Image (spheres, rainbow, N blue to C red):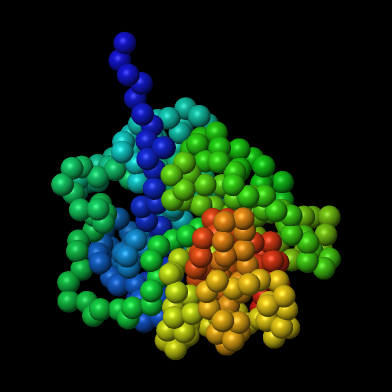
Amino acid sequence: MNAPRTTGFQDMSLDHVTVYVEDLDARTAELARTYGLEVYATADAEGGARSVAVGRERIRLVLTEAVDDDHPAAVYTRLHGEGVADIALKVPDAAAAFAEAVRRGARPAAQPAERDGVITASVMAFGDVRHTFVQRREGVPADRLPGFVPASGRAAAALTGLLEIDHFAVCLEPGELRSVVEFYERVLDFRNTFTEKIVVGAQAMDSEVVQNPSGTVTLTLIEPDTRREPGQIDFFIKNHGGAGVQHIAFRTEDIVASVGTMRSRGVDFLSTPATYYHMLGDRLRLVRHSTDALAALDILADEDHAGQLFQIFTRSVHPRRTLFFEVIERAGATTFGSGNIKALYEAVEAEQLG
């Protein structure tokens, strides 16, 4: 008997993230200047859109702007504004992963195809976001993308210390949380690693974290509690036009240094009340950074069973005030702290009210 063909989900990892934008040149320049992401490949207007791939260390973002009104990027931005359209997953066999995902109930978005030694196939995930399975032939560079050519003559971006994408936060419409969690568990072999109900005043949300078998892809899935007053999750769903990625978290090994550099280069971060830091010493014995250093930059601190973590959100620069970024440092922590979740929620809520 032949050995069963592997789906590759056990060896799956994050490949790149596609973000549909309305002004490619402006977004590319912004990410280089403020986040330190360098252009490493470009694709011309073939097929109705032009794209730029930017990255640093293990971060890879593909920014795509439509030049044809019928291109998916144009349709997406009309419906949702700028946002994440594809969380691409690297697998050993893209065709096998696609076939198995569809067999398990995933909705196909693009059949397997090969170009430039890269095999891709896509399934729908949540809202209008898809997962593209990516496989590269032996000898093909790890950052090769179909239809892209390596960039040349680009100025080097400033170093900010950002290393990789730690997680994605996904806002779901009321009643979708359980079915989306089950989709990831059933279709892609993800596991539930963290569950939390957050109550802030008259608002509440339910959150579950799912992670792939190797721990390299993490999604924080959130839905609003409709029995409570509307809050930031409702705000996102209304302004975005349905479920989608609210923020992307970039991991660093020194959040104080990274945030300090990014702030000096123009990144606008959300503020934290001074009272938060007055009580921080009673709540945590910090293993890294001083309370004064964290307070000076509005960085939050918390812990889980394995260690501590430090986080801060950026202010959204998008017209709909939806997609934004997070910077996170993990000093042993593997999940999320309840205190930070509530504090971050309150920071976003205050920004939206402002």
**Does residue 229 lie above or below 156 as drawn?**
above
**Does residue 245 lie above or below 103 as drawn?**
below
Residue 341: x %, y % from top left: 66, 64
Residue 181: x %, y % from top left: 61, 42
Quarter of the picture containing the N terminus is: top left
Residue 167: x %, y % from top left: 50, 58
Q: Is residue 73 left or right of residue 199?
A: left
Q: Is residue 152 left or right of residue 243?
A: left
Residue 293, quarter of picture: bottom right
Residue 7: x %, y % from top left: 38, 32
Instruction: For residue 101, say whether it is visible.
Output: yes
Q: Which residue is rendered at x = 18% and y = 49% of the image?
A: 140
How many numbered marks are there? 0
Q: Which residue is rendered at x = 20% and y = 42% of the image?
A: 137
Instruction: For residue 76, say whether it is visible.
Output: no
Q: Which residue is rendered at x = 23% and y = 58% of the image?
A: 148
**Does residue 47 lie above or below 322 as drawn?**
above
Q: Nearer the viewer, residue 97 or 200?
A: 200
Q: Is residue 282 left or right of residue 65?
A: right
Q: Is residue 75 left or right of residue 96?
A: right
Quarter of the picture containing the C terminus is: bottom right
Q: Nearer the viewer, residue 170 or 76?
A: 170
Direction top: furthest residue: 1
